[in-house]
Image (cartoon, grey):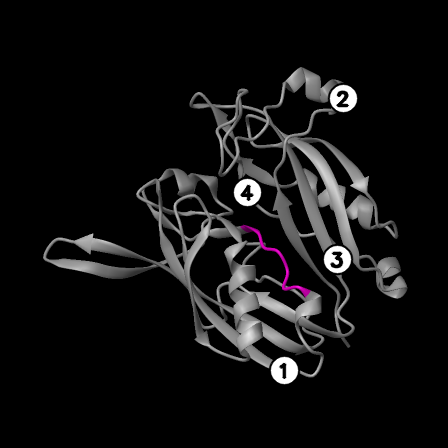
Amino acid sequence: MCSARVWLLILFAGWSSLGTAAAETKPFPLCPRSGPASSVPCATTPFPKTFINCKYTEQARQARVEGNLILTLIITAKGKPENIRVIKSLGNGLDEEAVIAAQQWRFTPGTYGGRPVAVAARMSIWFTNCNAYGVSAIVPAPDASYSISETVKGASHITRELRACGLDPKQMMRKEACAPMPVHLPRFPDSSHPMEVEGKIRLSLQILLDGTTGDIRVVNSLDKILDEEAVITAAQWRFRPALYKGQPAPARTTAEFRFGICADPKVSSLVE
């Protein structure tokens, strides 16, 4: 029997009408990732440190509920979510489960002028019931990992494998190597693939200092059109970048798209 799965997408955005609690914390809007600089004070993007996945309720399972649930919240200067509100509901107990999970998330806070500040944010949670043909995105691929290239005295460009350390904030403060963490992974567009196609596409990609992706290459092809769509989709992914000796560092990994029956979107490394 197919099991329901939950995958999550973080979308940070400025939000002006936040109510009394927001006014007290004075949340900052986020600085734009690209384009013209903001003309008003803005904060850097908070990075998720601890994920608690949402439960897919039995009521929702029986009703075969699928869709996008959206929360708005404030991420405080201490990295704690507050003033969590459901602005797009799915009902069937999923709203309550989303809030319970979001209350347990923790972030490296956004900063303004080098100091931690409260930031307005939006979190989008996708609930997909495994009941039909679909596409799974797996990052990194099951037999892959994250790695960086470092220079060592007497030898250059030594590849070092990175380990996940997102659940332990203390590890991130030490001079260690931490793997990237996916925080925004748009799904493969449903309208771009024929129902009869089954198989895998593997991509090699780099995760840059700002968490964007680059140097995306197809290493295992399935179909020319699907290959191109896979590259376009991966180009939209966003990560908390790798950390090496306490600083963001570029990393590489291999991702996999799986096409087939009951292969709903899932990112295995999203909840660590």
Q: Are marks 1 and 4 in contact (CB under 8 Å)?
A: no
> Tag 2, which secondary structure?
helix
Tag 1–tag 2 contact (CB < 8 Å): no
Label 4 to label 2, Cα distance in Å?
A: 24 Å
In screen coordinates, is 93 left or right of 262?
right
Q: Secondary structure at mark 4?
A: strand
Under circle 1, the secondary element is loop
In this rendering, the answer to whether 94 lies above or below 21 is: below
Q: Earlier in the sequence, mark 4 or mark 2?
A: 2
Q: Is residue 76 above or below residue 252?
A: above
Q: Magenta segment range?
A: 183-189
> 192 or 252: which is nearer to us?
192
Q: Position of residue 184 (x, y in %)?
A: 58, 50
Vertical arrangement, residue 116 with respect to residue 106, above or below: above
Which numbered mark, 1 or 3, is in the foreground of this view? 1
Label 2 environment density (alpha carbons within 10 Å; few <14, some 14–19, many ≥20): few
Badge number at residue 19: 2
Give amino acid for label 2.
Gly
User: How far apart are the two marked residues, 1 and 4, measured between alpha carbons?
Assistant: 33 Å
Q: Earlier in the sequence, mark 3 or mark 2?
A: 2
Kindly identify which residue carries mark 1. Answer: 198
Q: Which residue is mark 3?
A: 127
Q: CA distance from mark 1 to mark 3?
A: 23 Å
Residue beneath label 4, please? 48
Earlier-in-chain disc, 1 versus 3: 3
Main secondary structure type of the part rendered in magenta: loop
Q: Give the total of numbered labels.
A: 4
